[in-house]
Amino acid sequence: MLLTLVLFFLSAITIYLSCEYFVNGIEWCGRHMNLGATAVGTVLAAFGTALPETAVTFTAVVFGSTPEQKDIGVGAAMGGPLVLATVAYGVVGFALWMNRRKLNRGDSVIRVDHKGLAKDQLAFLAVFVVKVGLGLVAFAIKPWLGILFLATYGLYVWREIVSADTAPEEEELEPLKLRPKNASMGWAGLQTVIALCVIGAASHVFVSQLESIGILFGLSPHMVALLLSPVATELPEIMNALIWVRQGKERLALANISGAMMIQATIPSSLGLFFTPWMLDTPLLIAGAITALAVLMLWLLFRRGNVEAKSLMAIALLYCGFAGYVAWHFMH
């Protein structure tokens, strides 16, 4: 038990420190590629930080030898978007509210491209509704629809790069941590890749210890897959959000979360369709309904164009409600 707790906290600290290097490196990569903050967050950063949770789904559905192991992959594919739509956005609001004095933000208003984020919520919701709907029916060509999800993500990336701002931010970036006096594309890319590898390894350890803690407390594998594993695998996005908001760059933080949500709506879903029957039980359907509700609330907030930190913090309460439901469901 002691070793499990030590590894748990050490891996969490490692993920945070590695994310410091990752966000620093990815910003320099974006600067060299002449990409603006939105494209850096939704494409470059999101793809990198989404690897741990995608790896969990891939390993479970492809190499899982029992239905229970494959269920963990399906649970991760449904739990990831739920955590991002509730906890991750709530963390952005909390971090901005906590740092409002340091950042001179007395009103704690989120400074982002509200219209762009509102469109992202609708795009995610359209894909997510199809994803959940497929979990209710069974038919012969259903596995082949996974290709459409992959194509959808490719189209999303193309749209983000073409339509997003292409001019880099005017503000000064922090010196490259690995090579402060030579922030070339080569060194920035190397720092980003190394940080990503460390994040992936530390995330694997973190998830393993979290599952061990769940077993020690008598939690079922399904509950771990729905509640604990998604929070663990989404930790890089949450850590990135904390780092960027602390620097006053909530635009990057929210773009990273928005891009990661689109990845979670497409790539893990395609894997689930390819390798499992993709039939959703009641807890998974409830997770889908709460995710859709959170995204609708986010769409209304961003559409209004004046989002305060406390509004994002309130959305995180939906996850608390889901956690209470899952705990009640498995105890009965």
Image (cartoon, rainbow, N blue to C red):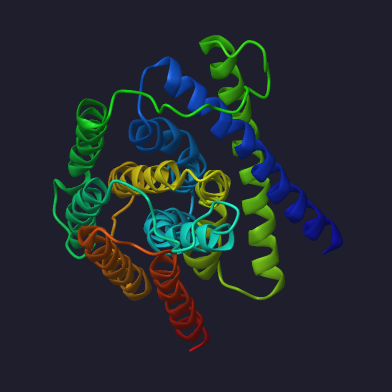
Up-down: is 292 above or below 250?
below
Where is residue 163? Give x, y as percent. Answer: 20, 30
The quarter of the picture where residue 283 lies is bottom left
Where is residue 59? Give x, y as percent. Answer: 49, 43
The quarter of the picture where residue 161 lies is top left
Where is residue 290? Give x, y as percent. Answer: 32, 71
Up-down: is 1 above or below 64?
below
247 displayed left or right of 154:
right
9 displayed left or right of 99:
right
Up-down: is 247 above or below 79?
above
In front: 235, or 145?
235
In front: 235, or 298?
298
Give the residue displayed 58% in from the left and 14% down from the top: 183
Give the residue displayed 42% in from the left and 38% down from the top: 46
Where is residue 219? Give x, y as percent. Answer: 60, 73
Give the residue displayed 31% in from the left and 48% down from the top: 269
In the rendered image, the residue lying farthest to the bottom is 332
264 displayed left or right of 100:
left
The count of marks equals 0
Give the residue displayed 44% in from the left and 75% down from the top: 317
Up-down: is 15 above or below 174?
below
Looking at the rendering, in which quadrant would you find the N terminus? bottom right
